[in-house]
Image: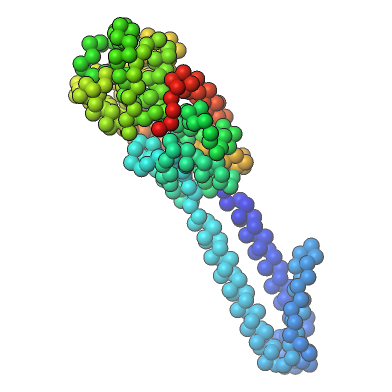
Amino acid sequence: MLWGPLTRLGLVVAVVSAAIDQASKLWLIHGYDLGAQERPEPLPFLELVLTWNPGISLGLFKQTSPFGRWALLAFMIAAAVLLWLWLARAFSRLTAVAIGLILGGAAGNAIDIIARLMGQWLSDRLGQQFVVENRPGAGSNIGTEVVARAAPDGYTLLLVAPANAINTTLYEKLNYDFLRDIVPIASIARFGNVMEVSPTVPVKSVAEFIAYAKANPGKINFASSGAGSTIHMSAELFKMMAGVNMVHVPYRGAAPAITDLLAGQVQVMFDNIATSIQHIREGKLRPLAVTTAEPSELLPGLPVVANYLPGYEASGWYGVGAPKGIAVEIIDKLNHEITAALADPKIKLRFAELGVTVLAGSSADFGNLLVDETEKWGKVVKFSGAQPE
């Protein structure tokens, strides 16, 4: 991240040091020692000559009077002090430059909290500030494009989410190619959804729901937090694999969707576990199964959808990416530090409170996940005919 600028700064320091050293030698060679009793005859003119060879050589300063010699010495001292002060300030500003972790969503939700947890950890470990920048809009495409177009110097990173994989197919035209322009650094977390129904729906298992849906084609409404969301795609994958006909009702966020689910205005939802768990515990919603490949510790005893539809799996994930062209050394360093964070008991506990589990792995592992998820959700988007809102 700092390697390029530090190299340039080191070069400047070396050149300035050489120049000052050369000037001092010229000064002494020509007898400009203010402590000397005898001074050389005044030279005709004040002149600075800079010539470029393999390095910089400083030409001979000349002056016309004793006053000029004193003025020249004062000038050289002042110039040297100012130059070193400038270099010190430049170095200070360089190390103080914050690294932006771009998030394609609003502040306050689970992914925002996770991003800030990781940013604080990296700031503490690397001694350089990581700042989360929320860039919502266009289904997270605005924030992703910012990173895709950024310089690959390690100062701009992306909090990667399922929307990135889904949007590749959901949007006909993007100003970037996600898999080409964003380099995977590390995965962070995984989270699942829960298939839940309003208490008004007369089913208590996934098998009963499938039978009920087939007996009532087009009469069951399923809610989502918006077209192309993981909640929407989880339900569409279920439709595709179960062969049932349900009507999609998109909302602007999960909160209004749950409100209508509680009221029986819609019948089913594949919501994030963390968002619905309190309603489930209070008996206001009936959970049928979780969408992950493995049962959830948050909902013990609840089966997985795959028990009824073999091969079904729908989960979300978060990770960190960077613009293509970033140095391998930076990728390895960040992956190492993120992996260390995910092993910390405090981080694990906080993740559990947010309804997500740790997902550690190499940058290559994360890259494979992104390729698989982009292909998988691309098929579901095409099946559903979903369009961006």
Rendered position, 377 above or below 106: above
- The total number of labels drawn is 0
What's the coloring here? rainbow
Question: Residue 372: horizontal and vertical position, in percent?
Answer: 53, 23
Residue under the point 77% across and 79% down? 60
Quadrant containing the C terminus is top left
What residue is at 48 percent from the left and 21 percent from the top? Answer: 382
Q: Give the image quarter of residue 323.
A: top right
Q: Nearer the viewer, residue 309 or 62?
A: 309
Residue 87 place in picture, x, y as percent = 58, 66
Residue 266: x and y, percent? 26, 21
Residue 355 visible in the snapshot: no
Q: Is residue 120 above or below residue 275?
A: below
Residue 220 in the image: above or below residue 389:
above
Q: Is residue 287 left or right of residue 383?
A: left
Residue drawn at point x = 43 percent, y = 25 percent: 386
Residue 139, quarter of the rendered image: top left
Give the x, y percent position of residue 235.
Answer: 37, 19
Nearest the viewer among 153 and 373 is 373
292 vs 182, left or right, is left
- For the point 68% across and 63% down, the residue is 14
Q: Is residue 99 visible?
A: yes
Looking at the image, which is closer to me, 79 or 271?
271
Residue at the outermost right position: 53
Image height of 137 relative to 238, above or below: below
